[in-house]
Image: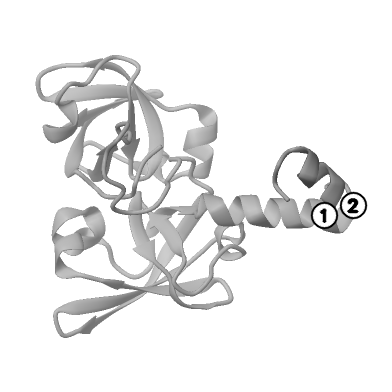
Amino acid sequence: MFTGIIEEVGAVSRRSGSDMTIMAKIVLEGVQEGDSIAVNGACLTVVSFSHDSFVVQMSPETLERTTLGSLRPGDAVNLERALAYGGRMGGHFVQGHVDGVGRVHSVQNQGEFSLWRFQAPAEVARYLVPKGSVAVDGISLTVVEPMGDTFGVAVIPATIEKTTLSSKRAGDPVNMEADMLGKHILHYMKQMTRGSLTLEKLKKHGFA
C-alpha cells in the first residue's frame, strides 16, 4: 500500500529483459530484498540492491498495462516506498496496481499554480468524481471538473519540482490508478443490482 506522496525522482540506469535497474537514494534507506517500491505508480518488488541502486523485475502484465516497458536508461521515474505501519497518510490509499495508461491532455499556467487536464482510459474514467482522488504516475492528485474521459487537477509548484511532471508535455502517456474505495463501492453496487449481493448477505457479514 502507498500514499501517492513521491519520495524522490530516480533514474533508470539499465534495462535487460524484464529486469530494470534504478538509481536512487532516499528509497534505499533500510531497503531489503522483497520490499515493495512504487515506480511511476506501479508496485514492483526489489530483487537486489546496492548502495545507490536497486533492481526490479517486470511481469508481462506490468509491461502490458503500464508505461514501464517504454522506459530507457536515463529516464526519470517517481519513487515511493510502501507505507510503513503507523506512518502519516498524506495522500490517499494507492495500491500500486495501475489500471491503465492515460495521457496529458493540456497544461495551463495559472499564476503560481498550473491546471493540468488528463485523458483517462475507461478503466479509470468511470470512477472519476469531483474532489475524488486519482494516482497519475504514482502521484496522488485531487480530481477537478471530470468531463467524460477527461479531468483536471490543480498542481502546486512543489509537486512539479519533486516529481516527473516537470518533464511532461501534452500527449505524453502516464500510468493511472483509480481510487480503490470507488472501485469497491461500484463493485458492490453492481452486485446488488444483479441480485448477487442482497441486504441479508450484507447483514450476515456485518455491513448493514
Which quadrant of the view contains residue 166? bottom left
Q: Which residue is mark 1?
A: 192
Residue at point 79%, 39% (across, down): 204
Residue 168 rendering spot, x and y as whole percentages? 27, 62
Question: Cα distance, mark 1 to mark 2?
Answer: 5 Å
Q: Which residue is mark 2?
A: 195
Residue at point 17%, 44% (across, down): 8
The residue type indicated by label 2 comes to: Gly
Q: Label for residue 89?
A: none
Above or below: residue 201 compared with residue 114: above
Relative horizontal placement of residue 185, taking residue 25 as reference (left or right): right
Colour scheme of the rendered structure: one colour
Above or below: residue 206 compared with residue 176: above
Mark 1–mark 2 CB contact (< 8 Å): yes
Q: Is residue 33 visible?
A: yes
Q: Residue furthest right?
A: 195
Q: Nearer the viewer, residue 28 or 171?
A: 28
Secondary element at image label 2: loop
Residue 113 rendering spot, x and y as whole percentages? 20, 77
The residue type indicated by label 1 comes to: Met
